[in-house]
Image (tube, rainbow, N blue to C red):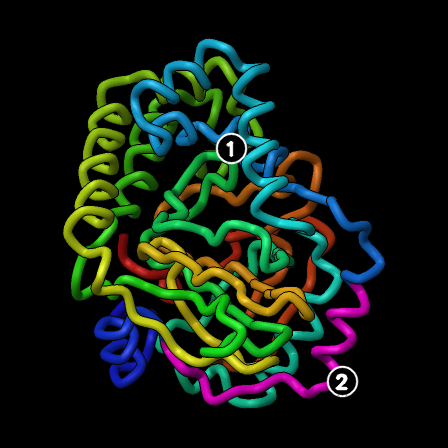
Amino acid sequence: MHDILQDSGFREHYARGFLETGITLPTTLVETIRGHYAARELGHNDFPKFFVDNEHQAYLEGAAIGAVLNTFRGFGRTLVKRFYDKAYSKAVYCDQQMVEAVLREVLAQGLPRLFKTRYIVASYDMYLRNTHQCPAAGIHTDLPNFHHFYETENDISLYIPLVDLDEANGGRITVLPESRLKVPGNVLLKMLHDHFSADPRWVDEQGYVDPNRIPPEAMAGFIKGPAHQDLMTLYKGVIALAKKQHAHQFEKTVETAGRVLLFNNKNFHAAEPWKNPQLDREVYVIRMVPLYDVPIRLKGKLHGTQVNNFLVDMELGEVRRFDQEVDVRLIPAANKLPL
């Protein structure tokens, strides 16, 4: 993260787990976002689709439940759907309709001043809504995974509450600072490249690993291999440490409607219970990924939905939307981060 954020912002993020941007979306834009997602029916829940077959699901659930999820796939899907149906009254992934408007606003309000690196890919967005009767999200980390194929230990989320998340309402995000515990993620990018670049079938004419060429059976072989299994063992140990040794060291902040917060979703985080029976908790998030000098192309679709199609230029203060994934092969090496 030190190569991504300016020094003062890095120090705040490292010590607190999040970075106050000083940016607040106009009320009109906040209400536009809320109105856009109000059109989606209650009960809309993309979590099962995006997470039930996530290759890390079993590891996160522990050995016993993980074995069930792996062995009885249909039953596993049912369990995951029930869990997320209880947790959220509405969860919309990769809608991509509000991303450009939000990015243009935060760029106009000075977001680039916080960054060292020039380019960031806005990968996908999510809208989350829940009532006071829904369970709060417990301690977790959004581990790097192959569904997105290009996730790092330094991913950055624009986290924007659409209603006030405060002492009275609850619902605030709490984050374990990187200074307390770090989740290694970039090693997965290196492992993916080392493994798949060795086979010319998965490499394009410019020497980039193309995830769209890799069939499920080849990915399954990598997942079952010793390198990935060792990494999963490490992840399980770090997750246990976070829950057992650091549960009382999570930081929180006041989050008023439209106030833009930066945090790394790979750091451990959780949410307070939502307390207000008269109002639903609503949050909008844009997940962004920095670009590293590893020759791996981005995926363009996630479960049939477009992703990785916005390129943010922090130097020019501009965002470009593409009809397909950002072509990282066209980004000069000098504008990519060392892996």
27 within the magenta span:
yes
Q: How many marks?
A: 2
User: Which amino acid, by three-letter code, is at mark 1?
Assistant: Pro
Q: Give the percent coordinates (x, y) of residue 114.
A: 40, 82
185 to the left or right of 151? left
Q: Looking at the image, which residue sits at the far right?
A: 39
Q: Nearer the viewer, residue 252 or 179?
A: 252
Q: Nearer the viewer, residue 55 or 91?
A: 91
Per the image, the residue denoted by label 2 is 28
**N-terminal-most mark, 1 or 2:** 2
Residue 207 appears in the figure: no
Q: Is residue 211 visible?
A: yes
Q: Tell whether position 301 is magenta.
A: no
Q: Residue at x 68, y 49 (%)?
A: 324
The residue located at (62%, 56%) in the rendering is: 130
Graded by Cα atoms within 10 Å as few (under 14), some (14 to 19) or many (20 or more), the crowding at tag 2 reads few
Looking at the image, residue 333 sits to the left or right of residue 191; the answer is right
The crowding category of the residue bearing disc 1, from other C-alpha atoms within 10 Å (few below 14, some 14 to 19, many at least 20), is: many
Q: Quadrant of residue 146?
A: top left
Res 315 label: none
Residue interval drawn in magenta: 19-36
The quadrant of the rendering that contains the N terminus is: bottom left
Residue at image mark 1: 211
